[in-house]
Image (cartoon, rainbow, N blue to C red):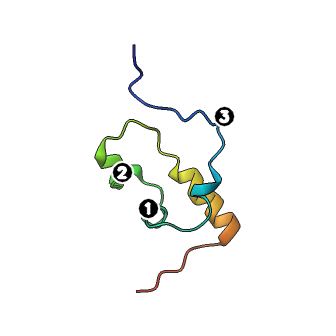
Amino acid sequence: MLQDVFYPQTNGELSESITQNWTEQALECYKLNGNCKNCSIAKGNYSFVCQMPKVIEVLKTVYGEPSFDY
């Protein structure tokens, strides 16, 4: 029987590749204050557990709050 949700096999650790900079998706999550209900990824019904709130915390710690150039 297959699980409905995919849990990454990383022992709870985040990949360094997704914590190297503020990506478009990371900025969206930041702007939504981690509210997954309004996230474009969550609306896509993907079969994995979103790690973005954890990524945001790492990015804020390492690089500080993002700046928005509009």
- On screen, residue 19 versus residue 34, left or right, reads right
Work out which residue is located at the far bottom of the displayed protein and give it. Answer: 70
Query: Tag 1: residue type?
Result: Gln
Q: Secondary structure at mark 1?
A: helix
User: Which of the 4 image quadrants contains residue 58?
Assistant: bottom right
19 or 43: nearer the eye?
19
User: Which of the 4 image quadrants contains residue 8?
Assistant: top right
| Residue 41 numbered mark, or none | 2
Q: Are the residues at dot 3 and dot 1 in contact (C-beta closer than 8 Å)?
A: no
4 or 64: nearer the eye?
4
Query: Tag 3: residue type?
Result: Asn
Residue 30, image x and y in percent?
49, 64
First in sequence: mark 3 vs mark 1: 3
First in sequence: mark 2 vs mark 1: 1
| Residue 25 numbered mark, or none | 1
Characterize the local packing of mark 2: few (<14), some (14-19) or many (20 or more) Cα atoms within 10 angstroms: few
User: Which of the 4 image quadrants contains residue 57?
Assistant: bottom right
Work out which residue is located at the far front of the displayed protein and give it. Answer: 17
Work out which residue is located at the far top of the displayed protein and give it. Answer: 1
- As measured in the structure, the alpha-carbon distance from the residue carrying label 2 to the one carrying label 1 is 9 Å
Characterize the local packing of mark 1: few (<14), some (14-19) or many (20 or more) Cα atoms within 10 angstroms: few
Name which residue lies at 53% across and 80% down: 67
Q: Secondary structure at mark 2?
A: loop
Name which residue lies at 57% across and 59% down: 56
Mark 3 lies on residue: 11
- On screen, residue 24 versus residue 37, left or right, reads right
- On screen, residue 60 versus residue 35, left or right, reads right
Residue 52, image x and y in percent?
51, 52
Q: Are the residues at dot 2 and dot 1 in contact (C-beta closer than 8 Å)?
A: yes
- As measured in the structure, the alpha-carbon distance from the residue carrying label 2 to the one carrying label 3 is 23 Å
Q: Are the residues at dot 2 and dot 3 in contact (C-beta closer than 8 Å)?
A: no
- As measured in the structure, the alpha-carbon distance from the residue carrying label 3 to the one carrying label 1 is 23 Å
